Image (cartoon, rainbow, N blue to C red):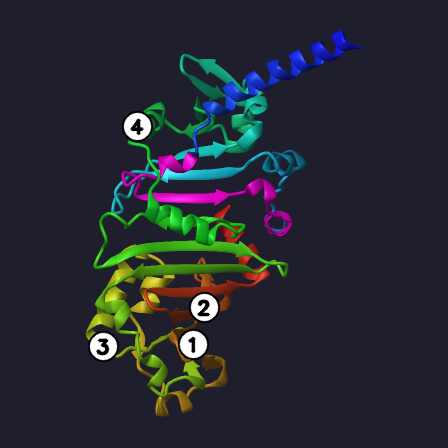
Amino acid sequence: MRKTLKIALGLLCGVSILVSIFYANKENPRVYLSDRINLVYVNEDIDHKNFENVINLLNKADFNVDNEIKKGLSYVKGLYIVSDSSFISEKKSCVGIIDFGYVYPFIKLKVETYFDKVNDFYILKDEYAKRYLKGEQIYLKIEKGNFLIGKKEKDIERILKNEKYFNQNILKILDREKDKNLGMLILNLGKNPLGGFDELVLTGEVNKKEEMILTANIGGKNDIIKSFNGIAQDGLSGKKTIEKNKLYLRSTRDAELRSFLFFLNYFFRDSFIEGVSSNVYINSPKNDEKIATLSSDKVMDVEIEKKQFMSGYIDIKVKNKVIGNVELKGIAEEDRLRISTILSEEIVVNLLRAAK
């Protein structure tokens, strides 16, 4: 009995030592989000999130998400897609970082089922490249427990050479938005604020109704954000009738508001936001005689909140065909602007089909 116990304890100690060796070398993937990174997509705690509604939407758009992909999500702790390309660069290179958490040693054992080893990298086997990526070549490198994936070896090597540390500005955002099942897209403005803005984050979530909720958080301490302070007392809140495909903005300083529109156009050029933001009403509607002359299909009744600085109902078009309209709603907080919209299931499915 004692001999059996000693053997069991010896095996347990041996396993514990091996596990300790594996995990002592495991690096938190958040250290890759340094100030050298300009753009990053993050979705953490994937293995604990419910993606059933997301998968339903994808399948309705004919993406055919199979059980193998569903099962794979249960092993992924975090996904990070990072880019150190310039904001204004048309061609952006990016690298994906997959964190498998505590199961990564077991995932590593299966890598060569899907990848061929070539020197320091793995290359996705042709059969899987054709099945999932239309034959596109993908490279993989495993570094300190993280799986780095890219289209080019040099892109992965460049990310690995960057200085690694915990970026406090980004950590604050990650902890605040981590529950969103579609994750978040972050423009890293912390070190080099643009026009006084130090945060621009887009988050996404699919709810139980299979609607997609998109929210942009714009943060900073500048005159543009301050221009929305005090709007609660301007008398423009409450029930109002507004014209569709117009943005209604409230501000105490018109000049700063024009700068804000320029900021939006800079990041959302060639999108519907650029077209709409060039056609706005400022500090309206009051008693707008023009709205009274419009037909009912061109106007919308809304309830404007006291701190709501943006209102609008905007048509969504695919190939010049209107597939629905959505509400744009902006709320002014002390040092942040929050702009959100909700896309119906039908609109999301049509957008996914168009993007396929």
The residues bearing labels 4 and 3 have C-alpha atoms spaced at a distance of 44 Å
Vertical arrangement, residue 159 with respect to residue 64, above or below: above
Observer-side mark, 3 or 1, equals 3
Q: Residue furthest right?
A: 1
Q: Position of residue 96 (x, y in %)?
A: 43, 34
The residues bearing labels 2 and 1 have C-alpha atoms spaced at a distance of 8 Å
Tell me, yes or no, if residue 150 can be seen here.
yes
The residues bearing labels 3 and 1 have C-alpha atoms spaced at a distance of 24 Å
N-terminal-most mark, 2 or 1: 1
Q: What's the amino acid at mark 1?
A: Lys
* Badge number at residue 158: 4
Q: What's the amino acid at mark 2?
A: Asp
Circles 2 and 1: CB distance less than 8 Å? Answer: yes
Q: Toward the viewer: 64 or 286?
A: 286
Which residue was labeled with disc 3? 253
Q: Toward the viewer: 20 or 210?
A: 20
Circles 2 and 3: CB distance less than 8 Å? Answer: no
Q: Which class describes the residues within 10 Å of circle 1: few (<14), some (14-19), or many (20+)?
A: some
Circles 2 and 4: CB distance less than 8 Å? Answer: no
Q: Position of residue 40 (x, y in %)?
A: 37, 43
Q: What's the amino acid at mark 3?
A: Arg
Tell me, yes or no, if residue 113 can be seen here.
no
